[in-house]
Every structure is written in C-alpha cells, then in structure tokens.
Image: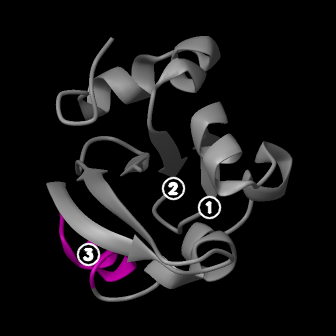
Amino acid sequence: MPTFETVTLPELVAFDADQFDALPFGAVGFTSDDIVELYNATESRLAGLPRDSVVGAPYFAVTAQCMNNFMVAQRFADEPELDVIIDYVLTLRMRPTRVRLRLLKKSDVSLRFLLIER
C-alpha cells in the first residue's frame, strides 16, 4: 500500500472505492470548483463527518473552512501543479490538531487531492 509520502495522483484517481477507503490517512478528491467527489472512510472517521454530508459540498467553503486560506485553498486556485507537504493545525470543530497536509494537483487530471495525516 502506498504511503502518505509516496502515493501518486494517478494512483489516487485509479483506486477503486475499497482501496481509497483503506488508505491509512485522510483523502479528499475535489473538482476545480472545490466540490468534493471523493471522501475516504479514514477521513470520515477521523474528522467525525459522514461521507454523505461532505460529498457534493464545496470543501473549503463548507467542510474545511479552517483551510480556506492562502496556505491551502488559495494554492489550489493559484498554482497549476502541486505536490507539496505542509505542516498545519486544524482548528474547526475540534481542539487544535497538528497534521501534515499533502496538496496534489496536475493540470491534466480533473480532480485535486488533499491528503491529511494525523
């Protein structure tokens, strides 16, 4: 199984639902207008948010407002391609939680991915 650091964007897109859910870190796939299409079981469990309340919603405006800033959401908007890991602190709906985020985006792939390692 690929790790947080080694999984690739083509792998994420190609995973079936069971493989995506089995990832040991949170994974969110969303469109260029931030609408969530993929939300894995790990992230659902760790964030305490049911998948059906997240899929179809604008990720940064509704679900992850604490990431709707220049460090995360704006990078997806501004940069044509991304594969970067950043240290971050989640603060919405929880006590501050240190995480690592991996931002993945390629110009030839329709979905962007945010990986969350707690």
Q: Position of residue 103 (x, y in %)?
A: 28, 56
Residue 76 visible to an observer of this rendering: no
Q: Quadrant of residue 63?
A: bottom right
Disc 2 target residue: 31
Select label 3 or label 2 by which is in front.
Answer: 3
Q: Relative to residue 96, is residue 5 drawn left or right? A: left
Disc 1 target residue: 35
Q: Position of residue 91 (x, y in %)?
A: 53, 81
Label at residue 103: none
Q: Going 73% across and 64% down the picture, which residue do you hit?
A: 57
Q: Going 18% across and 70% down the picture, which residue do you hit?
A: 79
The secondary structure type at the circle numbered 1 is loop
Where the N terminus falls, by quadrant? top left
Q: Which residues are magenta?
A: 71-80
* Residue 25 lies in the magenta-colored region: no
Q: Three-letter amino acid code at disc 2?
A: Thr
Prevailing SS of the magenta stretch? helix
Tell me, yes or no, whether the two marked residues, 1 and 2, touch with CB atoms within 8 Å. Answer: yes
Q: Relative to residue 92, is residue 51 drawn left or right? A: right
Disc 3 target residue: 75
How much space separates mark 1 and mark 2, taking CA atoms? 5 Å
